[in-house]
Image (tube, rainbow, N blue to C red):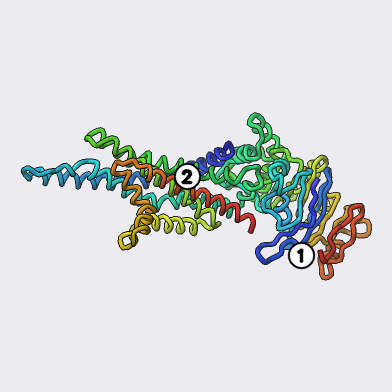
Amino acid sequence: MRNALHIAWRDIRSVFVSPIAYVVLTGFVLLAGWFFFNLLGQFNRYVASYASIPNYDSSWLNLNDAVLAPLIQNLGVVLLIVIPMTTMRSFAEERSVGTYELLFTSPVRVAEIVAGKFLAGVFLVTSMVGLSLMYPAILLWFGNPEPGLVFSGYLGLWLTAVSFVAIGNFTSSLTSNQIIAAVAGIVLLLLLFVINWAAEGAAEPWRSVLLYLSVTENLTGLVRGVIDTRNLVYFGSLIGVFLFLTHRAVESARWK
Amino acid sequence: MIEVKQLKKHYGAFEAVKGVSFSVATGQACGFLGPNGAGKTTTMRVITGYMPATSGTVTVEGFDVFENSFEVRKRIGYLPEQPPLYLEMRVTAYLDHVARLKGVPRARIAEQRDRVISECALEKMAGRLCGHLSKGYRQRVGLAQALIHDPQVLILDEPTIGLDPAQIIEIRELIRSLATERTVILSTHILPEVAQICQKVVIINEGRVALEAEMAELTRDGSLEDEYLKYVSGEAHALEPAAGSPVEDGPDA
């Protein structure tokens, strides 16, 4: 486990001494700010126009449903594009640069390498998701959103991000070409995002399976404020399965 | 001590190494020669544990590379053909990182790093980024990382490539001094280098051992160049038993 931390620390440093981390963090926070600004503007307009209607039930018009929920859903889509671009280096670069030979002739287990790369990715996405917490913080400061919903929604966003790291690292472990790793990662994530589209026309056992497999469905549950074990198990298994597949991919490449 | 027995390695349908056997004793530097594509790098990658063999065994310091991979890895320093540098790291930070990976105790990391920096004459470059170094210096940092855990066995894939003449002489001296207590395999295309540093020569060609001999025996009747060309060109497969070490594989092995 110590080795995993050494590898993670090296990767984190290499991202934070280069402009990569700052470009990614700035871009993410900037986009999140744009979403937040516009959602809040829309919320204000709605409040202004519906307030003039007498006896109107405006309970749906609250900061959680009108601002936070769409903000988190939109950030999920941004993560889908950004994370594969940050994870594409993880294995592919080491292969093409030749440091792979150093790693695999050192007394370090494959599992430690995979864990190290994963932890480094988790660190970066946690910084991203963490920085974007400034927007809910603004709401909590000036408004009155439900704090529990902020927590469960952000838990969902963070779990989504961490699962995306596991998937991005997996596609990176398959190739020495970083562009292939990134594109394959985005395609795979996008498929997981929209796999529930097929559920509408599907017969029953498949309908539930397709719905359960989709990131969107599981994220939506958490954004609505329901911390269901089903959703947690979903993200947990997504991470576990892709860490396992990465381990297998790295190990089998040595035998070819 | 390195013992390679009947080593075979296939990449898919391609047989890169077709039954190679040789041994290198402790305190010996072995020149590992052969034309490009002969299987040198593949053989070295198997010895270092980077990739498993298709068949055959390799033991390093008495440990099987496949069964006791970690024991072998702790005892081997390996300089691959392309020095495995993280270009965005400074030389000292890089060497510290390698030391941690190789399992050097935390208290000894600084000491070992300073030792290899002075052995490889990297003092002036210690604070530079690896990516800003010239080819020769990158090669020296590559050699430094191979030495950082004070390994018993050194596997060097073309260590003097890209160095200037003065550096070549220094590095040769260093390798020669290292070889007195260690086992060294030195792959190179520079035959005089082998003649200067090594006590033993293994020539491989087309995935087979073409010659395994003591340097003294080999250069008694002629120059190393003549011998090399004899074994590598045309009817090179004929195998002469080397003095003192029975050779198990013939051309048909």
In the image, residue B8 above or below residue B165: below
- Camera-side residue: B100 or B134? B100
Q: Residue B185 location in percent, x, y?
A: 78, 50
Q: Using the rendered view, name the quadrant where residue A59 is placed.
A: top left
Q: Residue at x 73, y 55 (%)?
A: B43
Q: Residue at x 80, y 50 (%)?
A: B3
Q: Which mark is residue A121?
A: 2
The answer to whether residue A190 of the structure is visible from this angle is yes
Badge 1, how many Cα within 10 Å: few under 14, some, many 20+?
A: many
Q: Residue A34 location in percent, x, y?
A: 28, 47
Labels 1 and 2 touching (C-beta < 8 A):
no
Q: Which mark is residue B117?
A: none
The answer to whether residue B120 of the structure is visible from this angle is no
- Camera-side residue: B121 or B33? B33
Q: Residue at x 76, y 65 (%)?
A: B206
Query: In the shown orientation, is residue A9 left or right of residue A162?
Result: right
Q: Amino acid at mark 1?
A: Glu
Q: Quadrant of the C terminus of chain A?
A: bottom right
Q: Secondary structure at mark 2?
A: helix
Q: Residue B2 location in percent, x, y?
A: 79, 48
Residue found farthest to the bottom:
B234
Is label 1 on the same chain as label 2? no
Q: Using the rendered view, name the quadrant where residue B219 is placed.
A: bottom right
- Label 1 marks a residue whose chain is B
Q: Which mark is residue B206?
A: 1
Residue found farthest to the right:
B221
In the image, residue B118 above or below residue A70: above
Query: In the shown orientation, is residue A68 left or right of residue B222?
Result: left
